[in-house]
Image: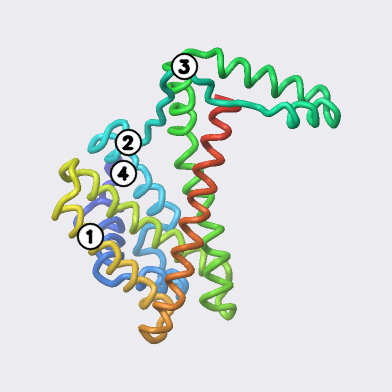
């Protein structure tokens, strides 16, 4: 612990140097890593996991229950139409029976137990889902921002930029629970830092960056939505 703290957390350690570069000169950290100047900083994957742990911990502290999905009332949460049931029985009788049995078990389950199971499953796999977004973002960055760079370089930038967002979200959720000036300032600071990170890593004119960032953000949030829906679906099926 002593060696680790001196190397990474000490006043001249890699942690503070990494965080300082990440926020004071967004994009520089990626350029330094690509150029081979790596020993002075945390590895991109270390930085990502540190930011991820802090963000999810602070979300729990600052806004407990924010990720909670509730099932209330007497209405069955899942219904299977007769035509779908018939098709399943014709195509795969065994799978059809298994699905039907699982649906019945879910519908007969107390709503409090169903809520607990789905949320427990989601809490375990949402961090994994976020990590799965990194290679997707890196691929899209390569397609849109530059084929001349290696995929690995885009992957490093994706780790850095997502870690940046995680750090800001951690700060966001440590503030007041009601949205106000504090959250607005943090959100603006996050957007400006991400904007500067793209400028520092990829360069180009402001208009070009704006035209490329808009589809990048849209694709990222679409992928995030798909990941979250998939996790909730498997929470039903496997939770």
Q: What is the CA distance from the residue labelled 4 to the residue labelled 1? A: 22 Å
Q: Nearer the viewer, mark 2 or mark 4?
A: 2
Q: Residue 162 appears at what percent x and percent y?
A: 40, 57
Q: Quadrant of residue 157?
A: bottom left
Residue corresponding to mark 3: 74
> On the rendered structure, is 171 left or right of 56?
left
Residue corresponding to mark 4: 54
Residue corresponding to mark 2: 66
Q: Nearer the viewer, mark 4 or mark 1?
A: 4
Going from N to C along the chain, the mark reached first, 3 or 2, is 2
> How dense is the environment of label 1, judged by Cα within 10 Å: few (below 14), some, or many (20 and up)?
few
Q: What is the CA distance from the residue labelled 3 to the residue labelled 4? A: 38 Å
Q: Quadrant of the N terminus?
A: top left
Going from N to C along the chain, the mark reached first, 3 or 1, is 1
Q: What is the CA distance from the residue labelled 3 to the residue labelled 2? A: 24 Å
Going from N to C along the chain, the mark reached first, 3 or 4, is 4
* Closer-to-camera residue (100/34): 100
Q: What is the CA distance from the residue labelled 3 to the residue labelled 1? A: 60 Å
Going from N to C along the chain, the mark reached first, 1 or 2, is 1
Residue at image coords 46%, 56%: 221
Residue at image coords 30%, 46%: 3
């Amino acid at each position: 612990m002593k060696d680790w703290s001196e190397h990474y957390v000490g006043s001249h350690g890699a942690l503070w140097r990494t965080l300082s570069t990440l926020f004071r000169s967004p994009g520089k950290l990626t350029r330094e890593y690509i150029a081979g100047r790596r020993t002075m900083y945390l590895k991109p994957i270390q930085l990502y996991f540190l930011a991820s742990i802090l963000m999810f911990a602070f979300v729990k502290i600052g806004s407990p229950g924010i990720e909670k999905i509730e099932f209330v009332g007497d209405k069955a949460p899942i219904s299977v139409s007769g035509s779908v049931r018939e098709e399943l029985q014709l195509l795969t009788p065994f799978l059809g029976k298994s699905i039907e049995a699982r649906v019945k078990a879910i519908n007969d389950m107390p709503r409090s137990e169903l809520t607990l199971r789905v949320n427990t499953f989601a809490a375990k796999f949402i961090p994994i889902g976020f990590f799965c977004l990194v290679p997707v973002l890196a691929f899209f960055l390569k397609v849109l921002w530059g084929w001349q760079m290696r995929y690995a370089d885009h992957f490093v930038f994706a780790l850095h930029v997502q870690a940046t967002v995680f750090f800001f979200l951690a700060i966001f959720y440590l503030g007041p629970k009601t949205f106000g000036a504090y959250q607005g300032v943090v959100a603006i600071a996050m957007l400006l830092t991400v904007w500067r990170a793209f400028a520092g890593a990829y360069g180009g004119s402001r208009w070009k960056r704006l035209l490329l960032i808009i589809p990048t953000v849209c694709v990222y949030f679409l992928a995030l939505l798909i990941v979250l829906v998939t996790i909730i679906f498997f929470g039903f099926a496997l939770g």
